[in-house]
Amino acid sequence: MPADAKTRTLCEQILRLKERTDTVILAHNYQVPEVQDVADYVGDSLGLARQASQTPHSQILFCGVHFMAETAAIISPKKRVLIPDPDAGCSLSDSITVDELRAWKARHPKAISVGYVNTTAAIKAELDYCCTSSNAVGVVNAIPRSREVLFLPDMFLGAYVAKETGRDNIRIWAGECHVHAGITPEDVSKKLDSVSNPEFLIHPECSCTTPILYDANSGKYGSRQVSILSTEGMMRRAAESDAKNFVVATETGMLHRLAKQNPGKNFVAAADHAECQYMKMITLQGVYDSLAESKYVVRVPPRTAVKARRAIQRMLEIS
Ligand code: 13P
Ligand code: SF4
């Protein structure tokens, strides 16, 4: 849809300010379309972390939720990282506190702790390894099989990792993302039946991931292609697949880039209600204000950052 005059003017102002302030704009795949379209790079948590670690620009404007901007600040300590709205949180990262993690580790002193990137900097500082949805299986596979693993905080991603790695020594924290946990097998069935011969793309944070894995193995989906992927994995799969129709089980912001980069293919949300209100707190006006007023600077206490960086670096070295 062509942008209206106000949006076009705002975009031009943002691009000018971006040049003047030596800023790179990074945006997550769930951002609203107009924010994605003004970004220099749009991607998943892993891709955004990599971009933040490699950018030559002195300032990063992070369009995503707070833990993602914190991750950028941790791995690029010499850069200034801005987030348009510091209240853009994450229900999944809120599902474990530092005290809870310390108590869990104390009960399993020999275990290796692996935490999803959807955690606060303070949690990351307590971890042995960080991981994202695109490398969680690889990170756990890199840990000697004899070592017990504490996986946190997403129970559905944890169950998926346990199944894929074939390990029975993974303890999983019972956290969840309210958006992905809210996508039900009934939502999925309805949408799969609504289009002809669809391929099914599903994010491992979905609560339906585990039953769907079993259903797929038992042949319930017949010849339908079912893939469990990170948001960037979905982009790759959609581009290489011959399918014309796709049902996509993740936050609905994903559909914008999928449709934009794959003209002629049809993408349908598995659940229209799967919208993350935190991701949607970042607006084009907010991006402009952030650049114009140099707000809001993301600060991670240096001692926390040093410890958290270890877990993130270990992840980046593995994947
Ligand atoms: P990805 O790393 O797959 O982009 O997922 C991040 C996220 O917050 C999912 O809800
Ligand atoms: Fe967090 Fe879920 Fe929103 Fe992703 S979709 S940022 S996991 S609340």
Image: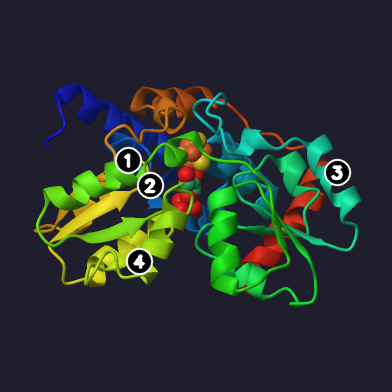
Tell me whether the residue at label 2 lies in contact with that at label 1, contact meaning CB atoms closer than 8 angstroms: yes
Q: Is the CB of the residue bearing disc 1 within 8 angstroms of ligand 2?
A: no
Tell me whether the residue at label 4 lies in contact with that at label 2, contact meaning CB atoms closer than 8 angstroms: no
The numbered mark, 2 or 3, whose residue comes first in the sequence reads 2
> Which of pointers 4 and 2 indicates the residue nearer the eye?
4
Mark 2 belongs to which amino acid? Asn
| Image disc number at residue 216 | 4
User: Is residue 22 in sight in this rendering?
Assistant: no
**Where is residue 249 shown, x and y percent of the image?**
33, 49
Mark 4 belongs to which amino acid? Ala
Q: Measured along the vertical axis of the image, is residue 240 above or below residue 16?
A: below
Which type of secondary structure does the marked residue at label 3 adopt? Answer: helix
Crowd around label 2: few <14 · some 14–19 · many ≥20 (10 Å):
many
Q: Is the CB of the residue bearing disc 2 within 8 angstroms of ligand 1?
A: yes
Which type of secondary structure does the marked residue at label 4 adopt? Answer: helix
| Image disc number at residue 253 | 1
Residue indicated by mark 3: 102
